[in-house]
């Protein structure tokens, strides 16, 4: 339906007469366009066939010109024969050119042909062979012009089989066959004058092949055309049988002459046979041209009759569409007018009117529904008349009841105001308690957090003390190891001292031996002295080193004693840290319990506050509802009074309608429904 929305909106803006006009226009427009396109197509086909007829008419003078050229070429080889004049053939061509040349675009080709004809005729001193060659070239040009006329006149595009094969025979088969037969006549004539010419015999053989091919093609074309259109058989059969018979006799004579077996025909017999075949070909052309023209005339007549039929049918359909459209408009206008008249009478208060129903379409259904609607409206008016009286009675009773309820609503509103004030005070007290409970919860939370932070700090201190204890034990072990190594160094130094004393004694003995040796041991004595001096230095250094090591060992012993005392203090600190952590854990548990209790108290206080607030809000809503009820009762009282007034007005309005035939407006009627 969305697709038809624009059309629906457009039709809503128009009257029914314009709607019918628009619908009729768009109904008839396709018929007119269809008829136009059909007529245009048929006119194009008629013009196509008419152009083909122009080509056929133009080919007739070209056939005469071909006959003239072939006869002139034969006369050029026979000095005793007079050359025919081209005036008549040229006059026919000029007449055809004036009628069909502009349509077929043959002007340039005709001018060229006429110039060549004038050139050939203007050679009085030319040899027979030159004249023959010139006429041959002119005949070839004429054959090309025949093909050009066939192309430009749509003959080569003919859509029907019978006319197509006749066109092909007339333009591309018969003219070349006539030219080939004329050449064979001229070759035979030349061979009669000189029987020793070998080239002429060869030409006969070549021309025989061409003639046989063309005759076979012509027979196939004529057979296909006659099969498609049997009416052509009596028109063409005799002519083409002559062509076939004369051509067969000619080919048989040529075959016998070239094979030199049996009876050998004379060249003049071949020439006469060729002339007979040429005459038969031109006679066939004279029969094909009118036959082809007749087919085209018949086709044009068929197209025109078809066009007249289409135009007649389209015109009748157009008239019928207009007739039905006017009938539809009149029927719609009649139905709408009758319904409109009834609607005017109903609007004036006459409910006894009957809607005429003269059609079975949507307007008839609308009229029927309008009649039903009028009957229902009459029943409704009767019922409303009765109901209006009852409404007046009920409205008076309602007004009295409402006045009694106004006092009760006022008392209820006063009581609700007092209860609401009391609940507001209770809600304020609950709010203060909830605020204090929140403060207690906050303090408990901070205490719990501080206890947790203290426990965490003590735990961290315990871990640090444990690490210090482990480091102190490691240091003590290192110091003890250092004492052991110092003792080992002392032992080594004692060994070094003993070695130095022994070296000193050995040096002394060496000095004694050197002194006893005299001059020979003097140098050895010097060495012994130096060794003794070195041994004294080693002994002295070993003594100093031993003293230092002794001091180190004393310091290590003091450090070991101090470390042992520090380890005892660290162990005591670790014990105190564990006790402190246990105490702080108890504090955290107590603080957690206190916080939970404070939160429960705060939650209960808040719930109490929320409950009292909801009670206050509910009381306020009840108070507002009481005020609204009071206002509604006042409004109902006013409405009841207005209802009494409106019922009286409604009774006066319904008095305008006439509900029964012959009754005056406002008369009492029997109610149809209770």
Image (tube, helix red, strand yellow):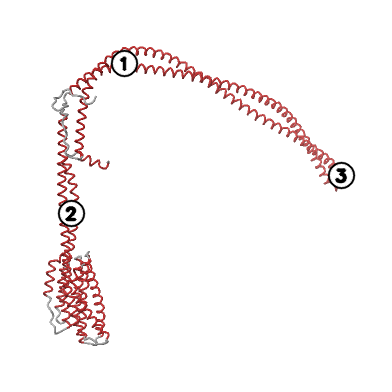
- Vertical comparison of 486 with 427: above or below: below
Mark 1, residue position: 630
Q: How many marks?
A: 3
Q: Position of residue 281 (x, y in %)?
A: 19, 76
Q: Residue at x 21, y 19 (%)?
A: 645
Q: Give the CA distance from mark 1 to mark 3.
A: 155 Å
Q: Position of residue 127 (x, y in %)?
A: 18, 83
Q: Give the CA distance from mark 3 to mark 2.
A: 167 Å
Mark 3, residue position: 515
Disc 1 versus disc 3: nearer the observer: 1
Callout 2 secondary element: helix
Q: Earlier in the sequence, mark 2 or mark 1?
A: 2
Nearest the viewer among 411 and 67 is 411
Callout 3 secondary element: helix
Callout 1 secondary element: helix
Query: Is residue 178 something one can see in this rendering?
Result: no
Residue 36 disc label: 2
Residue 624: name its quadrant: top left
Q: Earlier in the sequence, mark 3 or mark 2?
A: 2
Which corner quadrant holds the N terminus? Answer: top left
Q: Position of residue 449 (x, y in %)?
A: 55, 23
């Amino acid at each position: 339906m969305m697709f038809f929305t624009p059309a629906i909106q457009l039709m809503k803006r128009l009257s029914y007469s314009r709607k019918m006009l628009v619908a009729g226009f768009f109904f008839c427009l396709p018929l007119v366009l269809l008829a136009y396109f059909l007529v245009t197509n048929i006119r194009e086909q008629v013009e196509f066939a008419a152009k083909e007829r122009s080509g056929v008419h133009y080919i007739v003078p070209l056939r005469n010109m071909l006959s003239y050229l072939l006869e002139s070429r034969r006369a050029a080889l026979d000095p005793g024969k007079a050359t025919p004049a081209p005036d008549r053939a040229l006059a026919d061509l000029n007449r055809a050119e004036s009628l069909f040349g502009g349509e077929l675009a043959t002007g340039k080709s005709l001018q060229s042909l006429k110039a060549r004809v004038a050139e050939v005729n203007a050679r009085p001193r030319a040899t027979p062979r030159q004249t023959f060659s010139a006429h041959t070239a002119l005949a070839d040009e004429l054959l090309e012009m025949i093909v050009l006329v066939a192309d430009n006149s749509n003959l080569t595009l003919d859509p029907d089989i019978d006319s197509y094969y006749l066109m092909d025979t007339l333009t591309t088969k018969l003219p070349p066959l006539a030219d080939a037969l004329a050449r064979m006549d001229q070759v035979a004539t030349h061979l009669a004058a000189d029987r020793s010419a070998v080239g002429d015999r060869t030409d006969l053989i070549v021309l025989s092949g061409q003639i046989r091919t063309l005759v076979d093609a012509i027979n196939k074309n004529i057979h296909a055309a006659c099969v498609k259109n049997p009416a052509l058989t009596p028109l063409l059969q005799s002519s083409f049988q002559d062509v076939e018979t004369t051509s067969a006799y000619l080919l048989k004579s040529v075959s016998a002459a070239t094979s030199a077996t049996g009876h050998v025909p004379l060249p003049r017999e071949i020439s006469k046979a060729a002339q007979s075949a040429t005459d038969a070909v031109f006679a066939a052309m004279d029969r094909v041209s009118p036959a082809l023209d007749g087919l085209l005339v018949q086709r044009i007549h068929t197209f025109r009759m078809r066009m007249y039929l289409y135009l007649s049918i389209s015109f009748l359909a157009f008239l019928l569409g207009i007739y039905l459209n006017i009938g539809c408009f009149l029927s719609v206008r009649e139905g709408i007018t009758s319904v409109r008249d009834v609607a005017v009478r109903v609007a004036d208060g006459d409910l006894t009117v009957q809607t005429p129903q003269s059609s079975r379409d949507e307007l008839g259904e609308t009229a029927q529904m309008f009649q039903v609607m009028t009957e229902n409206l009459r029943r409704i008016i009767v019922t409303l008349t009765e109901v209006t009286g009852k409404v007046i009675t009920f409205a008076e009773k309602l007004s009295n009841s409402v006045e009694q309820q106004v006092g009760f609503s006022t008392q209820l509103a006063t009581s609700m105001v007092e209860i609401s004030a009391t609940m507001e005070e209770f809600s304020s007290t609950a709010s203060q308690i909830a605020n204090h409970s929140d403060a207690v919860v906050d303090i408990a939370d901070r205490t719990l957090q501080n206890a947790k932070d203290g426990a965490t700090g003590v735990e961290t201190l315990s871990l640090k003390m444990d690490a210090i204890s482990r480091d102190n034990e490691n240091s003590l072990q290192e110091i003890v190891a250092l004492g052991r190594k110092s003792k080992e160094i002392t032992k080594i130094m004692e060994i070094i001292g003993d070695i130095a004393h022994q070296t000193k004694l050995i040096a002394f003995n060496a000095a004694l031996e050197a002194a006893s040796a005299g001059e020979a041991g003097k140098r050895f004595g010097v060495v012994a002295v130096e060794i003794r001096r070195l041994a004294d230095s080693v002994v002295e250094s070993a003594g100093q080193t031993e003293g230092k090591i002794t001091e180190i060992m004393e310091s290590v012993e003091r450090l070991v004693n101090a470390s042992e005392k520090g380890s005892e203090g660290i162990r005591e600190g670790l014990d105190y840290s564990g006790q402190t952590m246990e105490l702080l854990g108890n504090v955290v548990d107590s603080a957690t319990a206190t916080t939970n209790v404070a939160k429960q108290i705060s939650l209960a206080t808040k719930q109490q506050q929320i409950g009292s607030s909801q009670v206050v809000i509910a009381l306020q809503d009840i108070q507002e509802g009481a005020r609204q009820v009071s206002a509604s009762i006042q409004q109902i009282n006013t409405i009841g009074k207005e209802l009494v007034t409106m019922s009286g007005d409604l009774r006066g309005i319904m008095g305008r309608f006439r509900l029964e035939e012959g009754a005056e407006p406002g008369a009492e009627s029997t109610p149809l429904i209770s």
